Image (cartoon, rainbow, N blue to C red):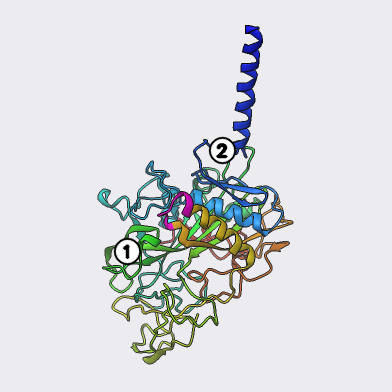
């Protein structure tokens, strides 16, 4: 009888252990969740766990809601604290979250085709005392038109060849940065690639080799190539927004009007996440922004606060010297409150006119699937982390393919082929595609090419085009 009781007890423990194993979400070969991990049913066939492991791959995507849930999984993991805290979105914590530890494009691609520093290296412009800060210097995508311009890097997606910075509610410009994860860094710096050098990119492709950034896989430890683009709003002192609603970071800013460094606190208001995986070799494209950014076009809001729209806006008339004018002539310009999503009429530069607020509206409202998944996740964040700033962020949309084009062994030319993209509507972030909201990310990224004057494709990435040659400054 004692032996029978022992057998029954052991079997009971085994059964209970198996039930716990299944219920705790063992959904991949690389991720383990503990019983205390909060979760929510993101869709009827997918669950989001609040933890810091970046998902490696979405697997087969049956519909838009599933894609949206995968995007939120990435957003949560990438914004997970790295200082040992488990308080997701603590408004008082300005330490780096996971994606902020990734390498910025300018550090990855030094001048003269030199090799970048080791992973986890502090930005060379930062002192040891400031090593926890961000370096922000990018405000737009124009090419320098005279010797006074010091900022000439990636920001707004369009327009090209004219001013395209974006002014916020407190008359400061938005700041942008682009970062890559460790898997992409390893691929670019691999000794057989050395793609931080433009000459190496060209010799690789002209020798008949394809550039295929690594794909995330649920069957091994590969996360795959990920690129992050962030839009930061500079905070006034004292702040003109409720800082408990924003992910805040400390930054060293290189001011385009003075060329000097200065310290500032910045608030995250836009985030692109793009991820190459086995299931989505043409990448899965997600974009998030702050809920207070801008009203829908035609909404005519009568009150409330927006980061990129002023309900009490007044027209502004400004005298613009020829050196900074979009027309290259001394001119008087009027920035009208009635004209939303219109790029500025002047450049920023040393001793030039300062930024001012521009009116922004969202031209394509969030679709029902985004709204539904956003409500579900935001409610769960508020439940488990009542003070979390991330309950005030929303998914705009996710672009994915139901029949993606597969990688080939031959070097491809631009534009890269795309197939069966979802959704059918335009997808734009009001803080990053302000002046190009009638497009999708892929409309531009399919033309991403290697560095230099070449039509060899860079696997949808614009990061590789930032490389320089050994003889190029």
Q: Which quadrant of the rendered structure holds the N terminus?
A: top right
Q: Secondary structure at mark 1?
A: strand
* 342 on left or right of 214: left
Where in the figure is residue 335, as x and y percent of width and height? 41, 87
Other-residue count near label 2 (Cα within 10 Å), few / some / many at <14 / 14–19 / ≥20: some
Disc with the residue nearer the chain's start (2 vs 1): 2
Can you give x and y, in whole percent of width and height, for residue 339 in the image?
48, 86
* Front-lying residue, 277 or 244: 244
- Asked if the stretch drawn in magenta spans residue 245, the answer is no
Query: Is residue 384 highlighted in magenta?
Result: yes
Q: Give the image location of residue 199, x and y in percent.
A: 52, 55
Q: Relative to 458, is 220 above or below?
A: above
Q: What segment carries the magenta color?
A: 382-389
Residue 249 appearing in the image? yes
Q: Residues within 10 Å of mark 1 (few under 14, many from 20)?
A: many
Q: 19 and 235: which one is in front?
A: 19
């Amino acid at each position: 009888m004692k032996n029978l009781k022992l057998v029954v007890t052991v079997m009971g423990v085994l059964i209970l252990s198996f039930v716990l194993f299944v219920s705790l979400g063992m959904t991949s070969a690389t991720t383990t969740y503990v019983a205390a991990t909060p979760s929510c049913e993101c869709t009827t066939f997918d669950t989001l766990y609040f933890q810091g492991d970046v998902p490696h791959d979405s697997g087969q995507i049956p519909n838009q809601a599933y894609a949206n849930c995968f995007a939120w999984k990435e957003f949560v993991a990438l914004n997970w604290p790295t200082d040992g805290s488990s308080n997701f979105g603590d408004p008082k914590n300005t330490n780096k979250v996971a994606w902020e530890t990734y390498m910025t494009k300018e550090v990855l691609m030094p001048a003269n085709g030199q090799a970048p520093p080791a992973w986890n290296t502090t930005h060379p412009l930062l002192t040891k005392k400031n090593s926890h800060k961000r370096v922000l210097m990018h405000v737009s995508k124009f090419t320098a038109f005279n010797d006074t311009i010091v900022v000439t890097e990636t920001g707004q997606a369009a327009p090209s060849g004219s001013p395209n910075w974006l002014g916020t509610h407190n008359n400061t410009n938005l700041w942008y940065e682009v970062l890559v994860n460790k898997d992409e860094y390893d691929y670019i710096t691999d000794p057989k690639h050395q793609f931080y050098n433009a000459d190496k990119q060209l010799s690789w492709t002209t020798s008949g080799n394809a550039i295929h950034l690594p794909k995330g896989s649920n069957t091994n430890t590969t996360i795959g190539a990920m690129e992050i683009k962030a839009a930061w709003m500079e905070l006034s002192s004292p702040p003109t927004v409720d800082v408990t609603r924003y992910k805040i970071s400390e930054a060293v800013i290189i001011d385009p009007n003075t060329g000097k460094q200065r310290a500032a606190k910045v608030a995250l208001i836009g985030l692109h996440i793009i991820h190459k995986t086995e299931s989505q070799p043409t990448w899965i494209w997600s974009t998030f922004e702050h809920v207070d950014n801008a009203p829908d076009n035609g909404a005519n809001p009568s009150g409330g606060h927006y980061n990129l729209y002023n309900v009490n806006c007044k027209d502004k008339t400004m005298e613009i010297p020829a050196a900074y004018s979009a027309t290259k002539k001394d001119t008087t310009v009027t920035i009208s409150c009635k004209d939303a999503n219109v790029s500025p009429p002047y450049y920023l530069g040393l001793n030039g006119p300062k930024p001012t607020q521009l009116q922004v509206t969202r031209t394509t409202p969030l679709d029902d699937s985004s709204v539904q998944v956003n409500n579900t996740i935001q409610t769960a964040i508020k439940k488990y982390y009542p003070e979390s700033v991330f309950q005030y962020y929303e998914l705009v949309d996710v672009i994915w393919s139901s029949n993606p084009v597969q990688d080939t062994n031959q070097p491809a030319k631009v534009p890269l082929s795309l197939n069966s993209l979802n959704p059918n509507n335009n997808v734009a972030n009001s803080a990053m595609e302000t002046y190009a909201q009638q497009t999708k990310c892929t409309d531009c990224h399919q033309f991403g090419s290697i560095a230099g004057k070449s039509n060899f494709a860079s696997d949808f990435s614009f990061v590789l085009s930032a490389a320089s040659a050994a003889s190029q400054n």
